[in-house]
Image: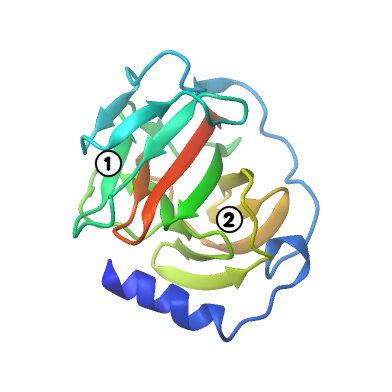
Amino acid sequence: MKMRLALLALAATMIPACGAGGNGSGGSPAGGPDPVLFSDHFSGGLGNWTVMSPSVIIDSPVGNPSPSLWVSSGGKAGAAAARTSATFNANVESGLWIWVDVLPGDSNGSINIVNSASPGTLNTYASITRSGALLSIAGQTKTVTFSEDSVFHRWLFLASDGNGSWWRDDVLLFAFPYGGPMVAIELMDLPYGVGTNFDNVTITN
């Protein structure tokens, strides 16, 4: 965990921003809106999630629109997280599309794609701050930076045709070969600063 934070801090001083999304190309990925396998706007509680920390709550005043999920490590030694109770097949012809709106606070929020067969091995994630992200696909990493703000941004992980890709606001940031296991989605706040809001989690294929 400390190494991920150190990599993000180091790369933020070395890699310039490129357009709105850091270091990628524009344009929305094609296809993928149907069918909806999972959708949660957090207006109905946490019944779809396995909560792995008491500091995971519904944040009624904040969202895109409100409410949203508030995950906070409280700046303590351990991360706080919630994981989908369901798992999803990332090896389908139409692709698996995982959308999450993210608003990092003074913190480092992470969208983790968890291999349900080996949940202790985390190698595909987007670790996000207000001004950058450390992206990983199957253990291959890339750091991107962007202009700092305090608004929700729409993130997408797409698994399709043996590849994975990370997108932010329809801008491609990173792509790399990715095998398609059964996966769960984990929303995490790393032990750095306090709190990340997540909203509008939608999974389609």
Near-viewer residue (146 or 172): 146
Residue 37 in the figure: left or right of residue 55: right
Q: CA distance from mark 1 to mark 2?
A: 19 Å
| Mark 2, residue position | 165
Question: Which residue is found at the position 25% from the left and 32% from the top?
Answer: 51
Query: For the residue marked with disc 2, what is the amino acid?
Result: Ser
Counting from the top left corner in percent of width and height, residue 118 is at 22, 49
Q: Is residue 145 above or below residue 45?
A: below
Near-viewer residue (116 or 143): 143
Counting from the top left corner in percent of width and height, residue 81 is at 29, 42
Question: Which residue is found at the position 33% from the left and 26% from the top?
Answer: 86
Residue 40 in the figure: left or right of residue 123: right
Near-viewer residue (181 or 1): 1
Look at the image and tell me whether residue 141 can be seen: yes
Q: Earlier in the sequence, mark 1 or mark 2?
A: 1
The quarter of the rendered structure image containing the C terminus is: top right
Q: Which element is circle 2 on?
A: strand
| Mark 1, residue position | 116
Query: For the residue marked with disc 1, what is the amino acid?
Result: Ser
Question: Which residue is found at the position 45% from the left and 77% from the top?
Answer: 9
Residue 48 in the figure: left or right of residue 16: left
Q: Quadrant of residue 100?
A: top right
The residue sitting at the front extreme is 61
Question: Which residue is found at the position 63% from the left and 53% from the top?
Answer: 167
Counting from the top left corner in percent of width and height, residue 94 is at 61, 35
Q: Is residue 43 above or below residue 142?
A: above
